[in-house]
Amino acid sequence: MAAIKIAPSFLTADLGRLAEEVRTVEAAGADYLHLDVMDGHFVPPITFGALVIEAVRKVSRLPLDVHLMIEQPERQLEAFAEAGGDILNVHVEACSDLRPVLEKIKSLGRRAGVCLNPDTPISAIEAVLGEADQIIVMGVNPGWGGQPLQPGTLPKVRSLRALLDERGLAPDIEIDGGVKVNNAASCAQAGAGVLVAGSVVFNDKASVAENMRALREVLATIEAQA
């Protein structure tokens, strides 16, 4: 098994100390920085846009995993690519025709990701699996941090992993939402190669470094068994 990537999500970080938070998770061994863009339409909350992505890009060279929880994402792709996003993830539920959106992301020189909400079946993206560099399986309903992992998430990831293996495809599978120390190993065993970690990293129970270390320790056990 390849090393599982951890992508701290800034949805629950202190955005008033954004640069400091970025440097802290980078020093703690983050692989990606996961940035949740919400427009108040596709999901009720509003977070931030391309200007914040640009600000993060200025203080980190880690890959920026940009999660576009917005309507008509094809209208904003150039802005997020220019801001420094490395992986642009769009929701199938927000795209009337997903294939040209993924193709547009790739034409911008960025990795193309597609996201599935908990109630959206794998069949919704089956026709474009060969176009995706990353598939995000939402472990919670998008919009708010701190939610528990929904029970259908891991069976869905296992089914997706089996389908990709059957077709000889190798996009990354990322689980976003509900990842904790006590379920991270199960997420990896189900077939996820990237874990988004929000409230499990940015909380008051321990420091960011200690929280990241706890995640790494449980994942190292699984990686060693592979």
Image (tube, grey):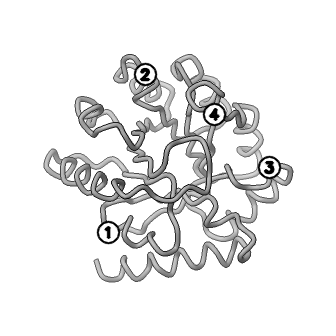
Question: The disc labelled 1 sits on which kind of residue?
Answer: Gln
Which of the two discs, 1 and 3, labels the residue nearer the N terminus? Answer: 3
Report if the CB atoms under discs 3 and 2 are less than 8 Å apart: no
Q: Is residue 12 above or below residue 113?
A: below
Image coordinates for residue 144, horizontal then vertical, percent? 62, 46
Image coordinates for residue 70, horizontal then vertical, percent? 57, 27
Q: Residue furthest right?
A: 16
Report if the CB atoms under discs 3 and 4 are less than 8 Å apart: no
Which of the two discs, 2 and 1, labels the residue nearer the N terminus? Answer: 2
In the visual, does 125 lie left or right of 118? left
Mark 3 vs mark 4, CA separation in Å: 15 Å
**Residue that numbered label 4 is attached to:** 38
**Residue that numbered label 2 is attached to:** 95
Image coordinates for residue 125, horizontal then vertical, percent? 29, 33
**Residue that numbered label 3 is attached to:** 15
User: Secondary structure under badge 3?
Assistant: helix
Numbered label attached to residue 189:
1
